[in-house]
Amino acid sequence: MVRLFRLEPEPPRKLYGVFDSIIRAIVSQQISNKAAHRIWSKVEGLAGCDQSLQALLLDRGISVLSDVGLSRTKLSTIETVIQRYRSGEWSDISLSSLSDEALIKALTSVKGLGPWSANAVLIFGLGRPDVCPIDDFGIKTALKKHYLSLQMADFATRTELNKTVKLIVGNWAPYRTVATLVLWHSLGNAPQ
């Protein structure tokens, strides 16, 4: 990890609000960082300087997103998030007050929001300090590259590999978010 810090990763910071982080996570799912950045730029452009994205979507719904390049599935997930905010079931304040585990449970109760999205909200919406999504493709790739490349043949089973990954990541507590950002940065695909 010391060697990776020499790559001068950006320090962790709270980048977005909770609502925006949820929408951004949905937009970014299962597409390249470049495609996600392009779509997100269009989404942000809809709100402009006068209005927040949250206010725009709560007021006008997903119809404003019809031409930004999102799939029907992603639009449906965003619609569910909008409904939960409109009904008062969710708010930035109520979600912010939840523990990491409770937030993950709340978000993953929505079809289309999985653990990857929930972890993204914890990191980029709430700036939680101890989050490492070990099932994230980028994290797995970076761990294999920087920590396990010489040992890969030693793992007879996926279970043994996962156990080793958990041990490595466990050593970084309570600052796993910093490690996560460093690992992403090491692959040249730090979140935009």
Image (cartoon, grey):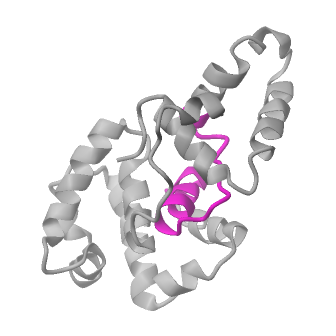
Quarter of the rendering containing residue 175: bottom right
**Residue at figure coordinates x 67%, y 41% from the top left:** 134
**Residue at figure coordinates x 43%, y 83% from the top left:** 85
Quarter of the rendering containing residue 57: bottom left
How far from the left and from the top, in percent, is residue 109? 60, 67
Decide if residue 63 is in sight here: yes
**Residue at figure coordinates x 78%, y 14% from the top left:** 151
Left or right, 166 with respect to 35, comes to: right
Left or right, 168 with respect to 129, comes to: right
Residue range in magenta is 112-139
Nearer to us in this view, 55 or 130: 130
Q: In this view, does 160 lie above or below 51?
A: above
How far from the left and from the top, in percent, is residue 155? 83, 16
**Magenta stretch contains residue 72:** no
Quarter of the rendering containing residue 105: bottom right
**Magenta stretch contains residue 126:** yes
**Residue at figure coordinates x 79%, y 8% from the top left:** 153
Q: Is residue 98 above or below residue 70?
A: below
Nearer to us in this view, 97 or 31: 97
